[in-house]
Image (cartoon, rainbow, N blue to C red):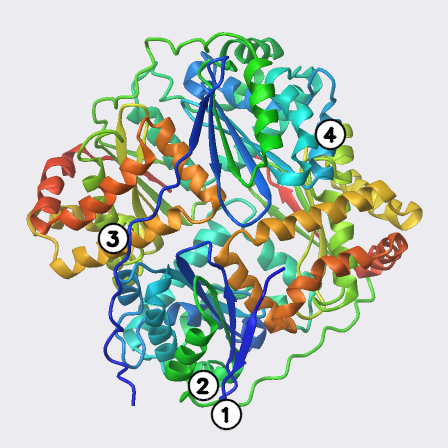
């Protein structure tokens, strides 16, 4: 008979190999990062520009500019842009964060040269047709109205508005009236000021051939001229406002209560950041976390609860998010505080810490699995000013060195109950 | 092209291995051929509730998750109307832990009353979170029973009513387990940095002595042909009107599935598609529009959906969707559109093969449908479709007597 009671022996989980990106400084100031990996003949290109939401004085402008780059260029109408991408099985999508606008494209390697001319114009020569802007605003306004009926969205909006400082642009959430205030001139102006090569980073991943790389270096290198993007206003401040305590948001007909909690911690480059990531994982970062065990698996108050750390340029925020049974939402909130308190007053068990550490070693491997996932990790770290290979090595050695005492020390220092900002929407 | 090796245990368990040396990881996918279709109409949502209970400990192992996390693993599961799928990834060196865990819960669950009580609450909150706590969330609860009157596809996997979850008892759990959770009703796929010989010997060691199932399974009633148009009007406090048109079509293995997939791609796949260009961009009737097929094992549904722009009425919106559908029945599609869809299908297959975990999941699903090898013939089938087949399908499908239309009215304050 086999022994079903005892787990098979653990084999060491190794630190992932972080592939070295070949970094090329283009003569217009842009930086090209080339990461060749994977088995499939596909290419992904991410063009990162200093054109995030905090660069614009008006809400919605940065998002609209980024999205509408693909809705008409000097030589291609909107329908032609989409026709070309669709016809080659290629995809284009945009993401806009507070700092950056990212234009991403993926394609089969052999078709990449067919989409390059249109991509070139999307980045450099969009024309922002008035009719496309009108349609975009009408559609996104309607989407926003739908989003504003979701308790989780309303909680996140209230948190953003009050967590950051007034006037910092980080505190901004779009209101319906803002959709009437965006003009074509705003987009044209924003594009010409912020879509500049000097601070652009271009990440190529998958299996690009030499021809693909040459063509990227040519079109987004020597052929793309212009200075650096306009720097963000000095008023742009990503530090949190003084604690507002707790806000309740009334959402009509909500069938659950959304809880959103936020706690200022440290930014990505701080020496405690990795330790805090481990602490956040213990609290609510995986299925076996304290919050999941207590609030879902013991009490059944929610389908899911989690904590994670988000970072801006200089700061970090640990947040806890859940949708809970409405009549027991105060109980859920006090259980979250109880779990925070427990981390501060009792050292985490050795078995639990070993378990979390091994889980996170596996997560490190998973995060670098596949050409595109690897590229996304390397891009995120590079743009945050962190060396990817060093970050992974540091993470791995921190996991080996961390002790229950150190976890408790971090909890005492950072998980200060009175510092949590709380929004309850329901 | 995905290479596979197949092995079958004496107890009926199918084992499939796909080797991918580009990753240090392995994915293990265990598919059970049971879904919401196998539920009693008075106890819907049970297959999905049961999926939750599979994480509450098994005969010899009190916790499923902890030992998996301890070897760097991560897992989840999902339930559809046809199947329940459990999947995990872990460093390939620790593969045996996955076999130990999965075989013990196939052998026997812990059947704990406490776990059942908690998971009933968790699933009730999941029900609320997905279906009630967001605008338009209850559409699946309304649309399915409009299109299906007899077949169990008439309820979604969460169940037809929240009260059914409440009624579940431990005896139901036991019966369901013995009826469906057995090696001859399961498919095990391992993909990643593994060897087939090792996978097969681990399968022998851990699954080899688990016995076949004996309990009888309920027969699935076929849905009779729909003979007249159906409609349902509801009012909800949402910002915009929404229309959901459903039409009956073939099952996943019918040629009509591939033809309808092509048809809906031409209508709505990508920004250059017909519905996007004409109904969003040119005519500004919808803020969002879609065409898709359900892909269920048994005969499924083709849906046309749209969120109406302010000032647009339902009659105009419905006519606009039908006009586009019937234009294909009347005039067919262009060779250029057809070529575009073929290239997009081919590209999708290439992207889908980038992830070992995705491959494991797809192989298990194809083995469930027919055989895992069929995944490599998909592009060939799509390429064999003739332009006129798409036109004919459009003619056949978009008939008023085949339509069930849900009008989701915005109750403006």
Residue at mark 3? A291
Q: Earlier in the sequence, mark 4 or mark 1?
A: 1
**Of tags 4 and 1, which is closer to the observer?**
1
Question: Where does the image place residue B122, in percent across and percent down from the top left?
Answer: 36, 61
> What residue is shown at x 37% (from left), y 9% (from top)?
A233
Residue at mark 1? B214
Of residues A418 and A10, the one nearer the viewer is A10
Residue at mark 2? B178
Distance CA(mark 2)–CA(mark 3): 33 Å
Q: Which corner quadrant of the image does residue B309 belong to?
A: top right
Question: Where does the image place residue B126, in percent across and percent down from the top left?
Answer: 42, 57
Residue A251 in sight here: no
Direction from residue B8 to residue A22 in the image, left or right? left
Residue at mark 4? B281
For the residues tagged 1 and 3, is the chain the same? no
> What's the chain of the residue with tag 3?
A
């Amino acid at each position: 008979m086999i022994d079903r009671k005892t787990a098979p022996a653990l084999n060491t989980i190794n630190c992932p190999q972080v592939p070295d990106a070949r970094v090329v400084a283009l003569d217009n100031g842009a930086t090209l990062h080339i990461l060749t990996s994977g088995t499939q003949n596909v290419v992904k290109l991410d063009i990162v520009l200093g054109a995030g939401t905090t660069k614009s004085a008006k809400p919605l402008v940065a998002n609209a500019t980024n999205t509408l780059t693909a809705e008409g260029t000097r030589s291609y109408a909107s329908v032609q842009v989409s026709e070309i991408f669709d016809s080659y099985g290629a995809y284009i999508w945009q993401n806009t964060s507070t700092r950056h606008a990212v234009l991403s494209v993926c394609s089969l390697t052999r078709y990449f040269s067919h989409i390059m001319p249109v991509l070139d114009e999307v980045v450099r020569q969009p024309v922002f047709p008035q009719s496309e802007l009108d349609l975009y605003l009408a559609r996104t306004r309607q989407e926003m109205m739908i989003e504003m009926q979701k308790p989780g969205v309303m909680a996140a909006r209230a948190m953003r508005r009050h967590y950051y400082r007034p006037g910092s642009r980080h505190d901004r959430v779009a209101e319906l009236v803002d959709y009437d205030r965006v003009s074509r001139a705003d987009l044209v102006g924003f594009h010409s000021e912020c879509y500049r090569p000097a601070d652009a980073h271009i990440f190529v991943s998958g299996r690009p051939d030499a021809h693909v790389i040459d063509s990227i270096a040519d079109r987004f290198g020597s052929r793309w001229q212009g200075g650096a993007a306009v720097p963000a206003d000095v008023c742009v401040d990503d530090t949190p406002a003084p604690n507002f305590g707790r806000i309740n948001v009334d959402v009509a007909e909500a069938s659950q209560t959304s809880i959103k909690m936020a706690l200022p911690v440290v930014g990505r480059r701080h020496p405690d950041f990795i330790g805090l990531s481990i602490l956040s994982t213990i609290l609510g970062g995986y299925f076996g976390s304290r919050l999941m065990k207590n609030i879902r698996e013991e009490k059944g108050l929610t389908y899911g609860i989690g904590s994670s750390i988000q970072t801006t340029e200089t700061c970090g925020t640990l947040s806890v998010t859940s949708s809970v049974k409405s009549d027991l939402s105060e109980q859920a909130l006090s259980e979250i505080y109880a779990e925070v308190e427990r981390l501060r007053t009792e050292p985490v068990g050795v078995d639990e810490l070993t378990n979390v550490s091994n889980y996170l070693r596996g997560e490190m491997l998973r995060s670098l699995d596949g050409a595109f996932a690897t590229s996304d990790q390397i891009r995120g770290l590079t743009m945050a000013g962190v060396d990817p290979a060093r970050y992974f090595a540091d993470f791995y050695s921190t996991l080996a060195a961390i002790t229950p005492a150190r976890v408790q020390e971090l909890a005492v220092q950072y998980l200060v109950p009175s510092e949590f900002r709380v929004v309850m929407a329901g | 092209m995905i290479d596979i090796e197949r092995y079958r245990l004496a107890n009926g368990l199918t084992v499939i291995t796909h080797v991918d040396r580009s990753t240090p990881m392995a994915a293990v996918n265990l598919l059970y051929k049971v879904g919401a279709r196998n539920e009693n109409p008075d106890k819907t949502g049970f297959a999905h509730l049961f999926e939750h209970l599979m994480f509450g400990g098994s005969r010899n192992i009190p916790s499923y998750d902890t030992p998996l996390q301890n070897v760097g693993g991560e897992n989840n599961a999902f339930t559809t109307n046809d199947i329940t799928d459990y999947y995990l990834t872990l460093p390939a060196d620790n593969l045996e832990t996955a076999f130990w865990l999965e075989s013990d819960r196939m052998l026997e669950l812990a059947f704990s009353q406490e776990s059942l009580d908690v998971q009933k609450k968790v699933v009730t909150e999941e029900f609320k979170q997905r279906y009630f706590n967001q605008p338009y969330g209850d559409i699946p609860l309304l649309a399915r029973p409009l299109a299906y009157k007899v077949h169990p596809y008439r309820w979604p996997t969460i169940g037809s009513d929240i009260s059914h979850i409440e009624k579940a008892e431990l005896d139901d759990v036991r019966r369901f387990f013995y009826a469906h959770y057995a090696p001859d009703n399961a498919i095990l796929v391992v993909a990643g940095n593994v060897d087939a010989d090792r996978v097969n010997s681990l399968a022998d060691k851990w699954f080899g002595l688990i016995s076949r199932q004996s309990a009888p399974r309920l027969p699935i009633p076929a849905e009779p042909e729909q003979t007249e148009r159906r409609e349902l009007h509801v009012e909800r406090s949402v910002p915009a009107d929404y229309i959901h048109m459903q039409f009956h079509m073939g099952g996943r293995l019918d040629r009509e599935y591939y033809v309808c997939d092509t048809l809906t791609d031409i209508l709505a796949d990508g920004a250059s598609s017909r519905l996007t260009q004409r109904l969003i961009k040119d005519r500004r009737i919808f803020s969002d529009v879609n065409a898709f097929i359900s892909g269920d094992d048994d005969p499924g549904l083709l849906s046309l959906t749209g969120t109406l722009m302010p000032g647009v009425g339902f009659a105009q919106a419905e006519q606009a969707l039908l006009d586009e559908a019937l234009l294909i029945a009347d005039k067919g599609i262009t060779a250029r559109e057809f070529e575009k869809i073929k290239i997009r299908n081919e590209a999708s297959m290439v992207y889908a093969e980038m992830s070992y975990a995705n491959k494991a999941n797809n192989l298990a699903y194809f083995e469930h449908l027919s055989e895992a090898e069929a995944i490599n013939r998909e592009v060939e089938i799509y390429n064999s479709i003739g332009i006129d087949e798409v036109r004919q399908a459009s003619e056949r499908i978009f008939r008023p007597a085949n339509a069930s239309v849900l009008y989701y009215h915005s109750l403006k304050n």
